[in-house]
Image (spheres, rainbow, N blue to C red):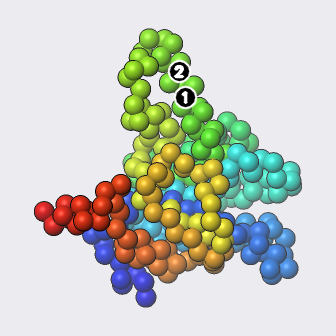
Amino acid sequence: MYKEQIDKNRLPHHVAIIMDGNGRWAQQRGKQRTAGHQEGAMRVHDIMEAATRLGIDYLTLYTFSTENWNRPEEEVSALMALLLQHLEQDLFMKNDARFRVIGDVSRLPQQVQDAVNHLIEVTKDNSKTCLVLALSYSSKWEITKAMRNIASEVADGKLSSDGITEQTITEHLETNFMPEPELLIRTGGEQRLSNYLLWQCAYTEFYFTNTYWPDFDEEQLCKAIVDYQGRQRRFGKTGEQVKDEESK
């Protein structure tokens, strides 16, 4: 099993996942797309618990993009109802896990907003994995919002234009409370970022799998981590430079 192959001293602190393939999983079984989303929601529970057992600090899941608002109204309504159903406080308390959200939460139905804010509050003092849902999120929206906020601070004299650095931008992003992801997993066979964490993934390792999200289990997660641990992360340096640094 892949779990036994994982080096616990080299775990990624932050794993991001694009949960793709729910609809295709359902269609292959002659079911409605919503059935795939229902199965996928249950998989979120399993993967969160697996991440907690492994000791991963942050798990960020691309749950609903700003572009997803363009889907048929019936499907969007079903997704919102499903989200509300699965924001289970007991699951987080049992696993000592925290909950956070990134995205334009103001566009979500009020009932969902209330449930999200409640779960964030009641889990804030938990100490293990932080599950972060990207809801009504896109990276272009996030960066645009950050630029507007920075421009406003410059206009108010709180910040000089010469003082804007990469760190300034990072601090104004939705993800400013957590490290950048070391590993990004995309299920479902597609190989693109789909407007997800574009700034944060500058040096993230990508792992693509044909497995649809409803079939992505703990063993699949461990397989991705083992693959990640087999790579050399160079950050623009040569392999020899990295080896020399690791040997010191």
Q: Which residue is mark 2?
A: 151
Query: Quick check: 152 left or right of 8?
Result: right
Locate residue 170: give its quadrant.
top left
Work out how far the residue at label 1 is from the one at label 2, CA to CA, in angstroms.
Answer: 6 Å
Nearer to us in this view, 222 or 133: 222
Task: Say above or below: 169 vs 220.
Answer: above
Task: Say above or below: 111 vs 95.
Answer: above
Query: Quick check: 126 left or right of 19?
Result: left
Q: Position of residue 85 (x, y in %)?
A: 68, 58
Q: Which residue is mark 1?
A: 147
Q: Secondary structure at mark 1?
A: helix
Q: Position of residue 84 (x, y in %)?
A: 68, 54
Tell me if residue 187 can be seen: yes
Residue type at mark 2: give it.
Answer: Ala
Task: Say above or below: 93 vs 10.
Answer: above
Q: Secondary structure at mark 2?
A: helix
Report crowding for label 2: few under 14, some 14 to 19, many 20 or more residues within 10 A (C-alpha): some
Nearer to us in this view, 129 or 16: 16
What is the quadrant of the C terminus in the image?
bottom left
Residue type at mark 1: give it.
Answer: Met
Nearer to us in this view, 244 or 43: 244
Query: Residue drawn at (45%, 67%), measured in percent from left and top?
Result: 51
Query: Residue drawn at (55%, 77%), measured in percent from left and top?
Result: 217
Residue most extreme to the bottom: 1
* Residues at discs 1 and 2 in contact (Cβ within 8 Å): yes
Tell me if residue 40 can be seen: no
Nearer to us in this view, 87 or 188: 188
Locate residue 31: give its quadrant.
bottom right
Query: Residue drawn at (63%, 76%), measured in percent from left and top?
Result: 210
Q: Position of residue 93 (x, y in %)?
A: 47, 59
Report crowding for label 1: few under 14, some 14 to 19, many 20 or more residues within 10 A (C-alpha): some
Task: Say above or below: 76 vs 52.
Answer: above
